[in-house]
Image: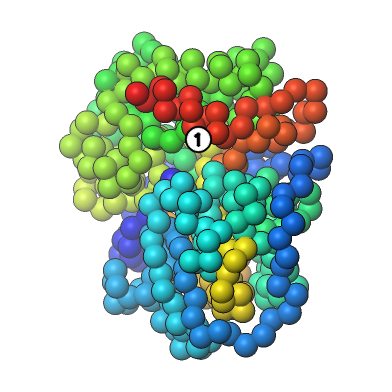
Amino acid sequence: MRAATGHGLRLAAVVAVASLAIAACGGSASTGGGGENGGRAAPPDVPKLESLGQGEGAINILAWPGYAENGTTDPSVDWVTPFAKETGCQANVQVANTSDEMFEKMGTGDFDVVSASGDSSLRMIYAGKVAPVNTTLLTNWDDIASFQKGQQWNSVNGVDYGIPHGWGANLLSWRTDKVTPAPDSWSVVWDTGSPYKGKIDAYDSPTYLADAALYLMNTKPELGIKNPYALDQAQFDAAVALATAQKPILAGYWSSYLDAQKNFTNGTYLLGTSWQIIVNLAQADKVPVDSVLPKEGSTGWADTWMVDAKSPHPNCSYLWLNWITSPKVQAQVAEWFGEAPANPKACDLTTAKDHCDLFHAKDEAYFKRIWFWATPQADCLDGRTDVKCIPYSDWTTAWSKLRS
Protein backbone atom coordinates (compact mmCIF):
# COMPACT_ATOMS: atom_id res chain seq x y z
CA MET A 1 0.00 0.00 0.00
CA ARG A 2 1.01 3.56 -0.57
CA ALA A 3 2.97 5.20 2.18
CA ALA A 4 3.82 8.88 2.16
CA THR A 5 6.49 10.91 3.83
CA GLY A 6 6.62 14.38 5.30
CA HIS A 7 8.22 16.28 2.48
CA GLY A 8 6.50 19.57 3.15
CA LEU A 9 5.50 22.59 1.15
CA ARG A 10 9.11 23.05 0.08
CA LEU A 11 8.27 20.58 -2.73
CA ALA A 12 5.34 22.56 -4.09
CA ALA A 13 7.24 23.55 -7.21
CA VAL A 14 8.38 19.99 -7.78
CA VAL A 15 4.84 18.74 -7.43
CA ALA A 16 3.74 21.28 -9.98
CA VAL A 17 6.29 20.14 -12.54
CA ALA A 18 5.47 16.47 -12.09
CA SER A 19 1.77 17.07 -12.17
CA LEU A 20 1.95 19.10 -15.35
CA ALA A 21 3.31 16.02 -17.06
CA ILE A 22 0.22 14.13 -15.97
CA ALA A 23 -2.11 16.90 -17.02
CA ALA A 24 -0.56 16.98 -20.47
CA CYS A 25 -1.12 13.29 -21.05
CA GLY A 26 -3.70 12.25 -23.56
CA GLY A 27 -5.53 8.95 -23.59
CA SER A 28 -8.78 7.10 -23.66
CA ALA A 29 -11.38 7.58 -21.00
CA SER A 30 -12.61 4.77 -18.83
CA THR A 31 -15.28 4.32 -16.22
CA GLY A 32 -12.76 3.18 -13.64
CA GLY A 33 -13.83 5.69 -11.03
CA GLY A 34 -17.40 4.51 -10.90
CA GLY A 35 -19.04 1.38 -9.67
CA GLU A 36 -22.48 0.00 -8.96
CA ASN A 37 -23.11 -1.52 -5.56
CA GLY A 38 -26.48 -3.12 -6.20
CA GLY A 39 -26.85 -6.86 -5.77
CA ARG A 40 -23.84 -7.38 -3.55
CA ALA A 41 -24.08 -9.50 -0.43
CA ALA A 42 -24.88 -7.66 2.78
CA PRO A 43 -22.02 -7.18 5.25
CA PRO A 44 -22.47 -8.01 8.96
CA ASP A 45 -24.96 -5.78 10.75
CA VAL A 46 -22.87 -3.24 12.64
CA PRO A 47 -24.68 -0.30 14.28
CA LYS A 48 -23.73 3.27 13.47
CA LEU A 49 -23.60 6.21 15.88
CA GLU A 50 -27.05 7.76 16.12
CA SER A 51 -26.18 11.08 17.78
CA LEU A 52 -23.04 13.01 18.55
CA GLY A 53 -22.24 13.57 22.21
CA GLN A 54 -19.32 14.91 24.20
CA GLY A 55 -15.88 13.70 23.23
CA GLU A 56 -14.43 10.98 25.41
CA GLY A 57 -11.08 12.77 25.81
CA ALA A 58 -9.00 10.43 23.64
CA ILE A 59 -8.75 8.91 20.19
CA ASN A 60 -6.47 6.26 18.67
CA ILE A 61 -5.71 6.93 15.01
CA LEU A 62 -4.30 4.38 12.56
CA ALA A 63 -3.10 6.22 9.47
CA TRP A 64 -0.78 6.26 6.53
CA PRO A 65 2.38 8.34 7.08
CA GLY A 66 1.65 11.97 6.35
CA TYR A 67 -2.07 11.80 7.10
CA ALA A 68 -2.05 12.63 10.82
CA GLU A 69 0.90 14.94 11.35
CA ASN A 70 1.52 16.22 14.89
CA GLY A 71 4.71 18.23 14.38
CA THR A 72 7.07 15.29 14.89
CA THR A 73 8.14 15.08 11.24
CA ASP A 74 8.30 18.85 10.84
CA PRO A 75 7.41 21.29 13.67
CA SER A 76 5.61 23.52 11.18
CA VAL A 77 3.34 20.70 10.00
CA ASP A 78 0.75 19.88 12.63
CA TRP A 79 -3.00 19.49 12.39
CA VAL A 80 -3.31 16.90 15.17
CA THR A 81 -2.34 19.17 18.09
CA PRO A 82 -4.91 21.86 17.15
CA PHE A 83 -7.55 19.11 16.92
CA ALA A 84 -6.75 17.95 20.44
CA LYS A 85 -6.84 21.50 21.79
CA GLU A 86 -10.18 22.29 20.16
CA THR A 87 -11.98 19.04 20.97
CA GLY A 88 -10.27 17.76 24.10
CA CYS A 89 -9.65 14.46 22.30
CA GLN A 90 -5.99 13.64 22.95
CA ALA A 91 -4.75 11.86 19.85
CA ASN A 92 -2.54 8.80 19.78
CA VAL A 93 -1.35 8.30 16.20
CA GLN A 94 0.12 5.04 14.95
CA VAL A 95 1.48 4.82 11.42
CA ALA A 96 0.69 1.76 9.29
CA ASN A 97 2.84 0.72 6.35
CA THR A 98 0.51 -1.67 4.52
CA SER A 99 -3.18 -2.26 3.97
CA ASP A 100 -2.80 -5.76 5.40
CA GLU A 101 -1.47 -4.23 8.61
CA MET A 102 -4.50 -1.97 8.80
CA PHE A 103 -6.85 -4.88 8.22
CA GLU A 104 -5.27 -6.91 11.01
CA LYS A 105 -5.31 -4.06 13.54
CA MET A 106 -8.85 -2.85 12.97
CA GLY A 107 -11.95 -4.41 14.49
CA THR A 108 -10.33 -5.02 17.86
CA GLY A 109 -11.17 -1.77 19.63
CA ASP A 110 -7.48 -0.88 19.82
CA PHE A 111 -8.07 1.90 17.31
CA ASP A 112 -10.93 4.28 16.67
CA VAL A 113 -10.38 5.42 13.09
CA VAL A 114 -8.34 4.36 10.08
CA SER A 115 -7.43 5.96 6.75
CA ALA A 116 -8.20 2.87 4.69
CA SER A 117 -7.49 2.36 1.01
CA GLY A 118 -9.71 0.36 -1.28
CA ASP A 119 -7.59 -2.77 -1.10
CA SER A 120 -8.49 -3.10 2.59
CA SER A 121 -11.72 -1.15 3.07
CA LEU A 122 -14.10 -3.74 1.60
CA ARG A 123 -12.35 -6.48 3.52
CA MET A 124 -12.93 -4.50 6.70
CA ILE A 125 -16.57 -3.92 5.84
CA TYR A 126 -17.32 -7.58 5.11
CA ALA A 127 -15.38 -8.71 8.18
CA GLY A 128 -17.50 -6.44 10.37
CA LYS A 129 -14.42 -4.50 11.45
CA VAL A 130 -15.80 -1.03 10.63
CA ALA A 131 -19.15 0.61 11.21
CA PRO A 132 -21.39 2.44 8.76
CA VAL A 133 -21.17 6.20 9.19
CA ASN A 134 -24.08 8.44 10.04
CA THR A 135 -23.62 11.06 7.34
CA THR A 136 -25.93 13.50 9.15
CA LEU A 137 -23.22 13.78 11.81
CA LEU A 138 -20.48 14.52 9.28
CA THR A 139 -20.32 18.30 8.97
CA ASN A 140 -18.36 18.25 5.69
CA TRP A 141 -20.28 15.43 3.99
CA ASP A 142 -22.18 17.71 1.63
CA ASP A 143 -18.95 19.41 0.56
CA ILE A 144 -17.18 16.23 -0.54
CA ALA A 145 -17.17 15.88 -4.33
CA SER A 146 -20.17 13.74 -5.26
CA PHE A 147 -18.16 11.53 -7.62
CA GLN A 148 -16.10 10.26 -4.68
CA LYS A 149 -19.08 9.00 -2.68
CA GLY A 150 -20.99 5.75 -3.05
CA GLN A 151 -18.03 3.97 -4.61
CA GLN A 152 -17.14 0.28 -4.51
CA TRP A 153 -14.41 0.85 -1.96
CA ASN A 154 -16.39 2.95 0.55
CA SER A 155 -20.01 1.80 0.38
CA VAL A 156 -22.10 -1.33 -0.02
CA ASN A 157 -25.70 -1.42 -1.25
CA GLY A 158 -26.11 2.32 -0.71
CA VAL A 159 -24.69 2.31 2.83
CA ASP A 160 -21.67 4.56 3.42
CA TYR A 161 -18.83 3.20 5.54
CA GLY A 162 -16.66 6.27 5.76
CA ILE A 163 -15.89 9.71 4.42
CA PRO A 164 -13.45 10.23 1.52
CA HIS A 165 -10.08 11.73 2.38
CA GLY A 166 -8.03 12.15 -0.83
CA TRP A 167 -6.94 10.33 -3.97
CA GLY A 168 -4.36 9.87 -6.68
CA ALA A 169 -3.23 7.63 -9.53
CA ASN A 170 -0.58 4.92 -9.74
CA LEU A 171 1.68 6.40 -12.35
CA LEU A 172 4.16 5.24 -14.96
CA SER A 173 7.48 6.84 -13.99
CA TRP A 174 10.80 6.83 -15.82
CA ARG A 175 14.33 8.19 -15.80
CA THR A 176 14.26 10.91 -18.42
CA ASP A 177 18.03 10.63 -19.01
CA LYS A 178 17.80 6.92 -19.83
CA VAL A 179 14.35 6.31 -21.33
CA THR A 180 13.52 7.81 -24.73
CA PRO A 181 11.13 8.61 -26.12
CA ALA A 182 8.94 9.44 -23.14
CA PRO A 183 6.51 6.53 -22.69
CA ASP A 184 2.75 6.99 -22.86
CA SER A 185 1.69 3.34 -22.52
CA TRP A 186 2.05 0.54 -20.00
CA SER A 187 3.33 -1.64 -22.84
CA VAL A 188 6.93 -0.78 -21.92
CA VAL A 189 6.56 -2.61 -18.60
CA TRP A 190 4.46 -5.59 -19.78
CA ASP A 191 6.07 -6.42 -23.14
CA THR A 192 8.65 -9.14 -22.48
CA GLY A 193 10.68 -7.69 -25.34
CA SER A 194 10.85 -4.26 -23.71
CA PRO A 195 14.17 -2.52 -24.36
CA TYR A 196 14.28 -1.77 -20.65
CA LYS A 197 14.00 -5.33 -19.39
CA GLY A 198 16.00 -5.84 -16.24
CA LYS A 199 15.42 -2.21 -15.27
CA ILE A 200 11.65 -2.27 -14.70
CA ASP A 201 9.92 -2.19 -11.33
CA ALA A 202 6.56 -3.52 -10.09
CA TYR A 203 4.51 -2.96 -6.94
CA ASP A 204 4.70 -5.85 -4.50
CA SER A 205 1.07 -6.57 -3.66
CA PRO A 206 -1.68 -8.96 -4.77
CA THR A 207 -3.49 -5.82 -5.92
CA TYR A 208 -0.87 -5.47 -8.65
CA LEU A 209 -2.73 -8.22 -10.51
CA ALA A 210 -5.34 -5.55 -11.22
CA ASP A 211 -2.66 -3.62 -13.10
CA ALA A 212 -2.15 -6.70 -15.27
CA ALA A 213 -5.92 -7.01 -15.73
CA LEU A 214 -6.18 -3.35 -16.70
CA TYR A 215 -3.57 -3.80 -19.41
CA LEU A 216 -5.41 -6.87 -20.68
CA MET A 217 -8.65 -4.86 -20.78
CA ASN A 218 -7.00 -2.65 -23.37
CA THR A 219 -4.99 -5.23 -25.30
CA LYS A 220 -7.08 -8.42 -25.08
CA PRO A 221 -10.71 -7.28 -25.39
CA GLU A 222 -11.74 -10.86 -26.17
CA LEU A 223 -11.25 -11.65 -22.47
CA GLY A 224 -14.24 -9.44 -21.70
CA ILE A 225 -12.70 -7.74 -18.65
CA LYS A 226 -14.85 -4.78 -17.62
CA ASN A 227 -13.42 -4.15 -14.16
CA PRO A 228 -9.86 -5.16 -13.18
CA TYR A 229 -11.06 -6.10 -9.68
CA ALA A 230 -13.88 -8.31 -10.98
CA LEU A 231 -12.24 -11.27 -12.67
CA ASP A 232 -13.75 -14.66 -13.41
CA GLN A 233 -11.44 -17.67 -13.48
CA ALA A 234 -10.35 -17.31 -17.10
CA GLN A 235 -9.74 -13.59 -16.72
CA PHE A 236 -7.87 -14.08 -13.47
CA ASP A 237 -5.69 -16.80 -14.98
CA ALA A 238 -4.80 -14.45 -17.83
CA ALA A 239 -3.80 -11.68 -15.40
CA VAL A 240 -1.67 -14.08 -13.36
CA ALA A 241 -0.04 -15.37 -16.54
CA LEU A 242 0.82 -11.84 -17.65
CA ALA A 243 2.30 -10.95 -14.26
CA THR A 244 4.25 -14.22 -14.26
CA ALA A 245 5.62 -13.53 -17.73
CA GLN A 246 6.67 -10.06 -16.58
CA LYS A 247 8.72 -11.37 -13.64
CA PRO A 248 11.92 -12.22 -15.60
CA ILE A 249 12.15 -8.69 -17.07
CA LEU A 250 11.87 -6.93 -13.71
CA ALA A 251 14.66 -5.40 -11.69
CA GLY A 252 12.57 -6.04 -8.62
CA TYR A 253 9.39 -5.46 -6.66
CA TRP A 254 8.90 -2.70 -4.11
CA SER A 255 6.47 -2.03 -1.28
CA SER A 256 8.35 0.79 0.45
CA TYR A 257 8.26 4.14 -1.32
CA LEU A 258 11.75 4.83 0.04
CA ASP A 259 13.09 1.71 -1.66
CA ALA A 260 11.49 2.77 -4.93
CA GLN A 261 12.94 6.26 -4.64
CA LYS A 262 16.40 4.85 -3.88
CA ASN A 263 16.28 2.50 -6.86
CA PHE A 264 15.17 5.24 -9.26
CA THR A 265 17.98 7.38 -7.88
CA ASN A 266 20.75 4.80 -8.27
CA GLY A 267 19.50 3.58 -11.66
CA THR A 268 18.34 0.12 -10.59
CA TYR A 269 14.91 1.15 -11.86
CA LEU A 270 14.60 3.05 -15.11
CA LEU A 271 10.82 2.88 -15.37
CA GLY A 272 7.74 1.28 -13.91
CA THR A 273 4.87 1.74 -11.50
CA SER A 274 5.28 4.61 -9.09
CA TRP A 275 3.48 7.10 -6.86
CA GLN A 276 3.60 10.86 -7.09
CA ILE A 277 5.41 11.05 -3.76
CA ILE A 278 8.28 8.97 -5.17
CA VAL A 279 8.60 11.29 -8.16
CA ASN A 280 8.44 14.38 -5.93
CA LEU A 281 11.20 13.19 -3.63
CA ALA A 282 13.43 12.01 -6.47
CA GLN A 283 13.07 15.33 -8.28
CA ALA A 284 13.82 17.19 -5.05
CA ASP A 285 17.12 15.30 -5.01
CA LYS A 286 17.76 16.42 -8.61
CA VAL A 287 17.15 12.94 -10.04
CA PRO A 288 15.76 13.17 -13.62
CA VAL A 289 12.46 11.32 -13.09
CA ASP A 290 9.10 12.10 -14.64
CA SER A 291 5.66 10.47 -14.64
CA VAL A 292 2.50 10.16 -16.67
CA LEU A 293 -0.99 8.69 -16.53
CA PRO A 294 -0.75 6.31 -19.52
CA LYS A 295 -3.26 6.16 -22.34
CA GLU A 296 -4.74 2.91 -21.00
CA GLY A 297 -5.63 4.62 -17.72
CA SER A 298 -4.33 3.37 -14.42
CA THR A 299 -5.11 1.86 -11.09
CA GLY A 300 -5.07 4.24 -8.16
CA TRP A 301 -5.90 4.88 -4.54
CA ALA A 302 -8.76 6.73 -2.90
CA ASP A 303 -8.56 6.73 0.88
CA THR A 304 -11.49 6.73 3.28
CA TRP A 305 -11.63 7.58 6.98
CA MET A 306 -13.53 4.75 8.67
CA VAL A 307 -14.66 4.12 12.26
CA ASP A 308 -13.79 0.89 14.08
CA ALA A 309 -16.84 -1.25 14.85
CA LYS A 310 -15.60 -1.49 18.47
CA SER A 311 -14.38 2.08 18.80
CA PRO A 312 -14.06 3.00 22.49
CA HIS A 313 -14.23 6.69 21.56
CA PRO A 314 -16.98 7.03 18.92
CA ASN A 315 -17.70 10.71 19.61
CA CYS A 316 -14.03 11.68 19.28
CA SER A 317 -13.96 9.55 16.13
CA TYR A 318 -16.65 11.65 14.49
CA LEU A 319 -14.99 14.83 15.71
CA TRP A 320 -11.82 13.64 13.96
CA LEU A 321 -13.67 12.79 10.74
CA ASN A 322 -15.14 16.28 10.77
CA TRP A 323 -11.76 17.86 11.48
CA ILE A 324 -9.70 15.97 8.92
CA THR A 325 -12.20 16.69 6.12
CA SER A 326 -12.56 20.40 6.90
CA PRO A 327 -11.31 22.72 4.13
CA LYS A 328 -8.35 24.10 6.09
CA VAL A 329 -7.00 20.72 7.16
CA GLN A 330 -7.69 19.15 3.78
CA ALA A 331 -5.58 21.89 2.19
CA GLN A 332 -2.75 21.17 4.62
CA VAL A 333 -2.83 17.42 4.07
CA ALA A 334 -3.15 17.64 0.30
CA GLU A 335 -0.11 19.88 -0.09
CA TRP A 336 2.00 18.06 2.48
CA PHE A 337 1.26 14.64 1.03
CA GLY A 338 0.80 15.53 -2.63
CA GLU A 339 -2.72 14.44 -3.56
CA ALA A 340 -6.16 15.64 -4.60
CA PRO A 341 -8.23 16.62 -1.56
CA ALA A 342 -11.68 15.09 -1.17
CA ASN A 343 -13.17 18.43 -0.15
CA PRO A 344 -12.97 20.90 -3.07
CA LYS A 345 -13.34 23.85 -0.67
CA ALA A 346 -9.75 23.14 0.29
CA CYS A 347 -8.70 24.37 -3.14
CA ASP A 348 -9.21 27.99 -2.11
CA LEU A 349 -6.89 27.55 0.87
CA THR A 350 -3.82 25.82 -0.57
CA THR A 351 -0.57 27.76 -0.55
CA ALA A 352 0.01 26.85 -4.17
CA LYS A 353 -3.09 28.28 -5.81
CA ASP A 354 -2.89 25.87 -8.73
CA HIS A 355 -2.57 22.78 -6.54
CA CYS A 356 -6.06 21.44 -7.23
CA ASP A 357 -5.77 22.10 -10.94
CA LEU A 358 -2.50 20.19 -11.09
CA PHE A 359 -3.93 17.27 -9.13
CA HIS A 360 -7.27 17.32 -10.96
CA ALA A 361 -9.21 17.58 -7.68
CA LYS A 362 -12.43 18.72 -9.36
CA ASP A 363 -11.95 16.82 -12.60
CA GLU A 364 -14.50 13.98 -12.63
CA ALA A 365 -13.42 12.86 -16.10
CA TYR A 366 -9.82 12.40 -14.92
CA PHE A 367 -11.09 10.61 -11.80
CA LYS A 368 -12.97 8.17 -14.00
CA ARG A 369 -9.82 7.26 -15.91
CA ILE A 370 -8.50 5.69 -12.73
CA TRP A 371 -9.54 2.24 -11.50
CA PHE A 372 -9.26 2.81 -7.77
CA TRP A 373 -8.23 -0.07 -5.54
CA ALA A 374 -11.18 -2.18 -4.47
CA THR A 375 -11.15 -5.52 -2.67
CA PRO A 376 -12.10 -8.33 -5.09
CA GLN A 377 -15.19 -10.28 -4.02
CA ALA A 378 -16.80 -13.55 -5.12
CA ASP A 379 -19.88 -11.46 -5.91
CA CYS A 380 -18.50 -9.71 -8.98
CA LEU A 381 -17.93 -5.99 -8.54
CA ASP A 382 -18.88 -5.43 -12.19
CA GLY A 383 -22.43 -6.60 -11.52
CA ARG A 384 -22.24 -9.98 -13.24
CA THR A 385 -24.39 -12.64 -11.61
CA ASP A 386 -23.89 -15.53 -14.05
CA VAL A 387 -20.36 -16.24 -12.81
CA LYS A 388 -18.40 -16.10 -9.58
CA CYS A 389 -15.40 -13.83 -9.44
CA ILE A 390 -12.10 -14.61 -7.76
CA PRO A 391 -12.02 -13.27 -4.18
CA TYR A 392 -9.09 -11.43 -2.66
CA SER A 393 -7.94 -14.47 -0.68
CA ASP A 394 -7.23 -16.24 -3.99
CA TRP A 395 -5.40 -13.17 -5.28
CA THR A 396 -3.19 -13.38 -2.19
CA THR A 397 -2.50 -17.07 -2.76
CA ALA A 398 -1.65 -16.54 -6.43
CA TRP A 399 0.62 -13.60 -5.63
CA SER A 400 2.46 -15.55 -2.96
CA LYS A 401 3.07 -18.36 -5.44
CA LEU A 402 4.20 -15.92 -8.13
CA ARG A 403 6.64 -14.24 -5.77
CA SER A 404 8.10 -17.44 -4.35
From the viewer's perspective, is residue 341 above or below residue 292? below
Percent across and percent down for residue 388 are 71, 25
Horizontal side of residue 389 vs 303, given as left or right: right
Outermost residue, left side: 266
Query: How many numbered discs sit on the rendered protein?
Result: 1
* Residue sitting nearer the eye, 276 or 2: 2
Asked whether residue 29 is in view, the answer is no
For the N terminus, the image quarter is top left
Q: Which residue is labeled 1 in the image?
A: 207
* Residue sitting nearer the eye, 307 or 110: 110
Horizontal side of residue 128 vs 261, given as left or right: right
Question: How is the protein colored in the picture?
Answer: rainbow
Q: Residue at x 32, y 26 (%)?
A: 200
Element on which disc 1 rests = loop
Q: Residue at x 56, y 74 (%)?
A: 312
Under mark 1, the amino acid is Thr
Percent across and percent down for residue 113 are 54, 66
For the C terminus, the image quarter is top left
Horizontal side of residue 49 vs 249, given as left or right: right
* Residue sitting nearer the eye, 117 or 315: 315
From the viewer's perspective, is residue 288 above or below residue 387? below
Asked whether residue 251 is in view, the answer is yes
Q: Residue at x 34, y 54 (%)?
A: 14
Using a 10 Å C-alpha cutoff, classify the residue at mark 1 as few (fewer than 14 neighbours), some (14 to 19) or many (20 or more). many
Horizontal side of residue 133 vs 313, given as left or right: right
Percent across and percent down for residue 127 are 62, 49
Outermost residue, front side: 108
Percent across and percent down for residue 343 are 60, 65
From the viewer's perspective, is residue 394 above or below residue 242? below
* Residue sitting nearer the eye, 253 or 14: 253
Q: Residue at x 72, y 67 (%)?
A: 48
